[in-house]
Amino acid sequence: MNKLSLLFRCVRNVPQAVHVMGNKLVLPFLVCYVGLFPLVLINRLLKEQNCPNCFNIKLDMFSVLLSNSSPNIAKKFHAGHLRSTIIGNFIANLKQALGNDVIRVNYLGDWGMQFGLLGAGFQRLGSQEKLQENALQHLYEVYVQVNREAEHDGSIQLAAAEFFRRLEQHDEQALSLWKQFREITVEEYKKIYERLGVYFDQYSGESFHQSKTREVLKDLQSQGLLKTTEKGTGVVDLSAEGDLSSYATLVRSDGTSLYITSHTVVFFLCYKTDKSQSVHFQQLFQILQAMGHHWADGCVHVPFGLVVGMSSRLGEVVLLEDILNEARYRMLQNMREAKTSKELADPELTAEQIGVSALIIQDFKGPLISDYKFDWQKVLQAQGDTGVFLQYTHARLRRSDTEFPICTKNTAAAQTSLLPSVQ
């Protein structure tokens, strides 16, 4: 495959992953140095992005089920999910560009004991009227309050366990309240994803496969893998000696399931979470292998580091909506202060688009595994490897498209061998 074909294969139909920085075409985790003037090259790639045969590329088509983002429902979108969302969206775009039929799934954290606590708390402190006015804010306030009370009141913990037990037994009243929380959350999250340029084909979650959990636990028990401890919990022994020196807990003493339990029911070949969950996925893959799923050898956990120091004018925040608003505000201020800025029909929309690009590119620049410090000044710089400079370059590309049109009808005959060698 020639160099231009390789570049095109990388970026075709992946507009969010094409970044021009200096004299190189940059894809996150993939840097292709080129000697051709970048504006001319990218101009050509953009013109051909809807023509899969233009560069004589033969792709094997197959379906890819890809899950990313996966925030917890009934809470405002935490900024900690930003990296998973961006990295997962890039991988999905890249897979699609390579010719795969990509099914984008948001596997929500919508089941677990925390919803027992929230359900019990809402029955005591919640208001349907406030839920209609500002749903996620009200649920957050209820959750914080009931957590605080549960630290000193054992009866609240018992009520939470009882509410979750009712959920797992499909109690109509408990399920109705939980469904209300879930539907409200998904609609609010869609607004955030739209601002990021992210979409999903399906909104799934741990709850969708809860009914099959019992079947998997029975299979584990019949294979002699699930053991009951003296405390009444159900565990799988992961130790080499079989002495329970290393194990994973799948069932609480009251019979309810845990986070890892749902992962034994529904599987993905690629999981993208922060590095703190590395042990969780090591245990999960061991369990799947012990169950006889030989394909589990191919399962991969893509860990990433955390972003440190995100803040806004409101103070130290961890809500993504606040970060997006802050990026728009700061970019708008920069535009107003810049002497070269032109009058725009909708300056706030422009500030929004550039600000979001700046956040995404900053995250791509950050180290994958190590934590990195967030710096607003660096994020919004107009020069260097930044999202602001990316948008500026994109504007020049579009301008050059009209001023210096390039013929791309006969790309197969292009003498790409004349391109300088990749360093």
Image (cartoon, rainbow, N blue to C red):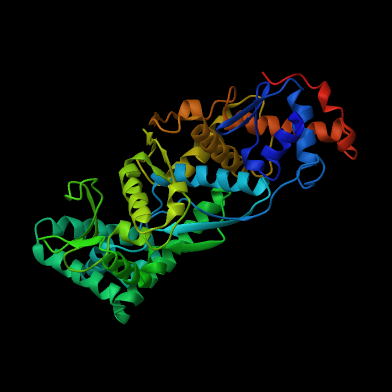
Residue found 44% across the figure and 48% down from its top: 297
Residue found 14% across the figure and 59% down from its top: 149
Decide: is 6 above or below 263: above
On screen, residue 348 versus residue 318, left or right, reads right
Depth check, front residue: 38 or 341: 38
- Quadrant assignment, res 220: bottom left
Depth check, front residue: 400 or 235: 235
Q: Is residue 142 visible?
A: no
Decide: is 302 above or below 227: above
Residue found 49% across the figure and 25% down from its top: 378
Depth check, front residue: 311 or 169: 169
- Quadrant assignment, res 292: bottom left
Q: How many marks overall?
A: 0
Residue found 42% across the figure and 68% down from its top: 208
Depth check, front residue: 160 or 101: 101
Q: Position of residue 121 (x, y in %)?
A: 22, 66
Q: Is residue 220 visible?
A: yes
Q: Residue furthest bottom?
A: 172
- Quadrant assignment, res 62: bottom right
Q: Position of residue 383 (x, y in %)?
A: 59, 22
Q: Position of residue 251 (x, y in %)?
A: 23, 63
User: Where does the C terminus fall, quadrant-wise?
Assistant: top right
Q: Position of residue 370 (x, y in %)?
A: 39, 30
User: Where does the N terminus fall, quadrant-wise?
Assistant: top right
On screen, residue 38 versus residue 282, left or right, reads right
